Amino acid sequence: MTQEEEEREFWLKGPIPNIPEALQPAAHALLQSEKELKKYTLNFPKELLWAKVAGRASVGFHMNHITGVLDRMLTYAAGKSLSEAQFQFLIQEGNFNLDTEVKELQENFSAKVEEAIHYFEQLPEAILMDKRTVGRKKLPSTVLGLLFHAAEHSQRHMGQLLVTVSVLCAKNID
């Protein structure tokens, strides 16, 4: 693959092997989020990880949150309820921990994206419109709806993370 091909956004690289056609956009968005997270937080100072700009969420929160949301959406898509560990992660997403390394948060999201892609590969396309519920209120969704939300949600947070990183580091990130 050439450098130009490597730099393309995932949606411009063509279909991802073994991913159902209907899940291609979600897979592309998750892989793009992973790529952007690594790019935007490359050499990001650990001491700024929990800093807030104008009262908005910190970089550390965004990194934890996209990992947690993806994990929760995969659980709901599988028709399961959240575990106690998932509830604890949800509660702790925004709590700063000065011992947390940026690399650790990058790796956590990468691992969750890898898990999602593997799940997509195993998922029969015939169940994408199966009904699923979300949260304690059992709000209605579908398998496809949950997986699409996980993908678009991660992209939305990448935009917010980019702005926060740019302001905190006073630099322009392409």
Image (spheres, rainbow, N blue to C red):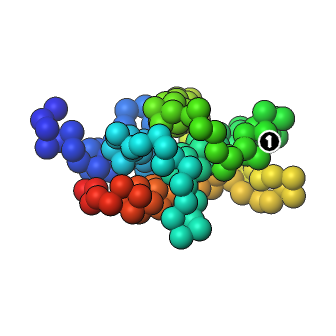
Residue 27, position as x, y percentages in the image: 45, 43
Can residue 126 be seen at all in this image of the molecule?
no
Q: Quadrant of the C terminus?
A: bottom left
Whether residue 138 is situated above or below residue 114 in the rendered picture:
below
Say above or below: 148 vs 105.
below
Q: Is residue 99 left or right of residue 165?
A: right
Q: Which residue is mark 1?
A: 87
Q: Residue at x 79, y 39 (%)?
A: 88
Q: How many marks?
A: 1
Image quadrant in which the N terminus is located: top left
At x 81%, y 52%, the residue is 135
When the figure is inspected, residue 144 is found, relative to residue 118, above or below; the finding is below
Q: Position of residue 130 (x, y in %)?
A: 70, 49
Tell which of 51 and 30 is nearer to you: 51
Q: In the rendered image, is residue 107 in sight?
A: yes
Taking depth in this image into account, of 64 and 75 the one nearest to the observer is: 64
Residue furthest toward the right?
137
Image location (x, y in percent) of residue 40: 36, 48
Which element carries disc 1, helix, strand or loop? helix
Q: Could you tell me the amino acid type at mark 1?
A: Phe
